[in-house]
Image (cartoon, helix red, strand yellow):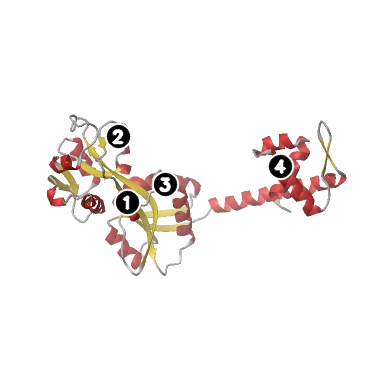
Amino acid sequence: MNYERLKTFVAVAEKKSFSEAAKVLFVSQPTITSQIKALEEELHTKLFERTTKRVEMTEAALILIKYAREIIRLSDAAQEKIQEIGSNIHGDLEIGCSFTIGEYILPTFLKRFKDNFPMVQIRADISNSDTIISCIKNHSVDVGLIETPIDDPQITLEPFLTDELLLIAAPDFLKENDGKVSAEHLKKIPLIMREKGSGTRAVVNHYLQMAGILESELNIVMELGSTESVKAAVEAGLGVSIISKATILKEKKLSLLTTYPIKNIAFYRYFYIVMRKDQVLKSTADLFLNELKKSANDNPYKSFNPLAQ
């Protein structure tokens, strides 16, 4: 017998009302009626007699109610035990993360993951994408999380989260600006960039080229090797930069940095899960990725497809 139908049956029996059962189960009254009708057809018997004031159980219903309650109790107990087993999953997990993901995205997710699965021991290596791919190939990490797509016949790539890059400046640096920066204005502003080879820089150049702006046309005054150094330079008023929205949450909250849209240009990219094509995931890696994808569903940009650009 269907679990949901039995739950509906017990609710109607206890409340002696279809409408009250609907309130308890947070469904519509027609749904209650449909569930009871389906159960009656399954059992080939009538379960309730309706009077003007209340619903009365038939003799068959009086027999069923005892078994229905026990079935529901056992089903709930089984589910609880299975969840307990899930929360006690143990083992080790080696992951490789590129810098933005490892330093700004992963910590919050890991807190939730460790709260739910405290027996899983995780070691995260934060490095560039090329190093992570090498580690996956030589089996030194179980799964990788990177910021740029990799074309490698041995590697499978799966996008799991969308990131937006924003133009940042110190609060008063662009005080004469009208709220948006034009492409022509962008060419003149002192610009601080990540080092050549950086995934962030590659994304910025990709979208600027699509808008007809070459890197050689930009007023690049400084190249720095980390996001933190870029933010510090921008806060000091040395120029502006274009970096991941995920990396400036604290600075925005403290009003240390201001963000500006660029007219007719938006910067989006995927974050990717990478694995070997022939890889069979161990249970901790499978669990980690399932939880990561669930968490990524809250991302407000998940419906945007930067690969279609």
Q: Earlier in the sequence, mark 4 or mark 2?
A: 4
Q: Amino acid at mark 1?
A: Arg
Q: Amino acid at mark 4?
A: Ile
Viewer-side label of 1, 2: 1
Q: Amino acid at mark 2?
A: Lys
**What residue is shown with label 4?**
32
**What residue is shown with label 3?**
109
Which numbered tag is attached to residue 269? 1
The CA span between labels 3 and 4 is 39 Å
Residues 245 and 306: in front is: 306
Q: Earlier in the sequence, mark 3 or mark 1?
A: 3
Give residue 186's position: percent from left, percent from top: 17, 41
Q: Quadrant of residue 169?
A: top left
Residue drawn at (24%, 39%), measured in percent from left and top? 168
Q: Residues within 10 Å of mark 3 (few under 14, many from 20)?
A: some
Q: Earlier in the sequence, mark 1 or mark 2?
A: 2
Q: Earlier in the sequence, mark 4 or mark 1?
A: 4
